[in-house]
Every structure is written in structure tokens, then in C-alpha cells.
Image: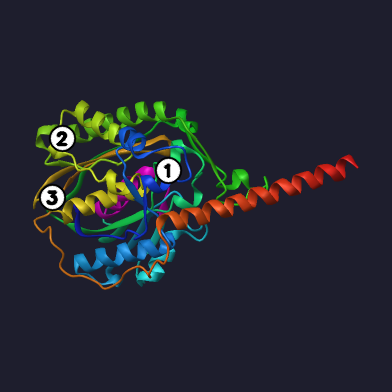
Amino acid sequence: MNHAAIIGWGKGMPPAVLSNADIATFIDTDEEWIVSRTGMKERRITHVSVAEMAEVAGARALACAGIAADQIELVILGCSLPDEICPNMASAVSRRLGTTNAAAMDVNTACTGFSYALSTATALIRSGVMKTALVIGAEMVSRCMDWDNRNVAVLFGDGCAAVVLQATENEEGVLAERLGCYADARDILDVRGVGQRYANTGIPNGYTSWNFDGQEIFKRAVHGMVQASTEAMAKLGKTIADIDLVIPHQANLRIIDAVGKRLGVDPDKVFVNIHRYGNMSAATIAVALVEAIEEGRVKPGALLLLPGFGGGLTWAAQVVRIGQRTTPLGSTGIDFPPCAKTGLELVNDLRARKARYHGAAKVFLEEAAALLSG
């Protein structure tokens, strides 16, 4: 049986930081409130597109793997808020990277986007359809964020990371997984204002409002991640004692702690970077995996558990075996263009744009009402 080894990894994190103190300048909140409820201290705000973030992460992953772009046979991108819907984002990334021999496809399962993309690419390699794939988790939440809603504005950030998979006879890569969805409760996490559902409402794309039932999401997230993890490990006859490191979706520190306790894992064996980046949706597990490797938390031959939960309400977990190499074979000089603004300045630009729209919409509605009444 073919396996799909992880042979390269890289991340593309925009440089502009939005701190809790920054958020407190336009929302009634403070450092203690945010940290105590989420574990988040700062997050990144991108000044470039999803495609540009993915290009940086992808190029770094290719260099790490020591392979050329034309060796890639599939570019698969997990993302729920892409630059565009048609054509897909994976094709844009493929063109930027020069992966001329690659198929290209997007996966939208919100925060589990990277997880589902990883399983999809693994399955295609296992079946012999292709040998080498680039799997990306990317998200630009900032431009669709409801920055006046404290319940969601403090939670999310932008970012991207990627891995290269390659066919191998060694027992590496995703060895078992469990994917699922609580479709009956999909409406408890609803980004309103993006998609064809709103095409004839007069609402410009990105001027969103968020429906976010925090308590119910917490319950579903913990249950889904624990169930997926338990069932994925059981497929291999493994228990949590066999896992070297748990790299969970970084949605909320309370969720991470609750999942860890229910699984019975030592907190020292759980990787956490939520304080640096917040919830980056489809990019979160990808970035955490890359950083765990970069920081030396992933040893050669390590067995990892990657549980996740996202809108939809999708859930997933994968048991992943890392190969004997945990250092890059090469590097690349590719990077983001300079960013002249702070994270707060970028967000305030987005808030001002939304305010201008609402002001114009109010005038239009008042004038229309006057015409109808006159």
C-alpha cells in the first residue's frame, strides 16, 4: 500500500500584528477579558491576497522538500474565504508557483479545510492517481470580519501554511483519519453576506454579519474533536499514550484544554500557538504543524494527532507519522512585499470602508423612501 509522506513544510505569515490592546481601541474589551476567555494575545492581519500568502507558504514547502514545482501533480487549497470563487484559488496558486503539471482544487470546510485537503490528497496518492501533492491551508478572515462584533472580532486572524506529500512505501503521513459533520446545527456558525444567497440583496461582498453561538460551538467542537480523535486512533489500535504530540485546531484555549482533558493527554504533549495567531480557520492546523516541526517539538518518526473543528459543522482528526527527516533540504528567498501599515491601521481601513458603505446605504434608503412617499 502506498502512503503519503510529509516531505516538505512552510508557512506564510503576514507581518502586521493586531494585539488585544489594538482591538480595545474600537471595541469595549481589554486584555484580561480576551485572554481569560480565548487564550489569544495577538493575531496577524494580511496586506496581501490569499493567493500571495499561499505562494509564499507553498514555495517554502517546495524548497524544504527539495523538489521543483513541475514535480507537483496536485495543488489542493483549504480555504473558506478565498480571493475569488471561479476560477478557484488553487489554480491561482499553481500559476504563481509554476506547477505546470498539477491539477488544482479547492476545499471549503471552514476551519477543517486543511484537514480535509490533507485527507483528500493522501487518498489520491494512496490510490495511485498521483505521487506528489502540495496541500495548503490559507485564510484571510480580516476582510470579511464584523469588526463591531466583540464575540468574533477578537477570535480570528489571517495566515497560511503548506506541506508537500509524496508517495512512499514507508508507513508515514496520514495513517488513519475520521471526518464528520454536524450538519443539523450548521446555522450556529454563519457568516452572513458572502455567497450567492446574498447576490440580490444589495450587500457588497465582505460587508458581513456573523451569527456565532459560542456556547453551543464549544460543546460541539469538544465532542467532535474527541470523537474523531478516538475513532482515528482506534483504527490503528492506538491510544493517546501512543501519541507523541497533539496538534489541535487553535480555536480557543478553553476548547484545546477541554479536548486534552477528555483524551487524557499530558498538557506538555499538546502544541499551542493560539496566543500568537488566534484562530486562522483553515490555516490553523497547518501553521501549528509547521511551527511544531520548526521548534523541534516533532522528533523523527513521531506519531501526531491532528484534531479539528469548523463551520458546517465539520470535524476531523488524523493520526500522522512523521518521517526520519525533520529539517529542511533547502530554502527560498521568497517573502511578502513590505507592509507600510500596522495591523490596527489595516483593520481601521477595513472598518472605515464598511462605515462608508453603511452611510451610503442609509442615504439611498432615505431617498428611496422619500420618492415613494412623495
Residue range corresponding to the magenta coloring: 106-127
Amino acid type, label 2: Pro
**Residue 121, magenta (yes or no):** yes
Dot 2 corresponds to which residue?
Answer: 267
Looking at the picture, does residue 365 appear above or below residue 6? above
Dot 3 corresponds to which residue?
Answer: 298
For the residue labelled by badge 3, is the local secondary structure a helix, a strand or a loop?
Answer: loop
Are the residues flagged by discs 1 and 2 in contact, CB closer than 8 Å? no
The residue nearer to you, when weighing 218 against 35, is 35
Q: Residue at x 14, y 33 (%)?
A: 240
Inter-mark Cα distance, 1 to 2: 30 Å
Q: Position of residue 84 (x, y in %)?
A: 51, 58
Q: Residue at x 67, y 45 (%)?
A: 201
Amino acid type, label 3: Val
Amino acid type, label 1: Ala
Q: Position of residue 311 (x, y in %)?
A: 42, 38
Q: Is residue 367 left or right of residue 55?
A: right
For the residue labelled by badge 1, is the local secondary structure a helix, a strand or a loop?
Answer: loop
Residue 125: assigned label? none
Inter-mark Cα distance, 3 to 2: 15 Å
Q: Quadrant of residue 341?
A: bottom left
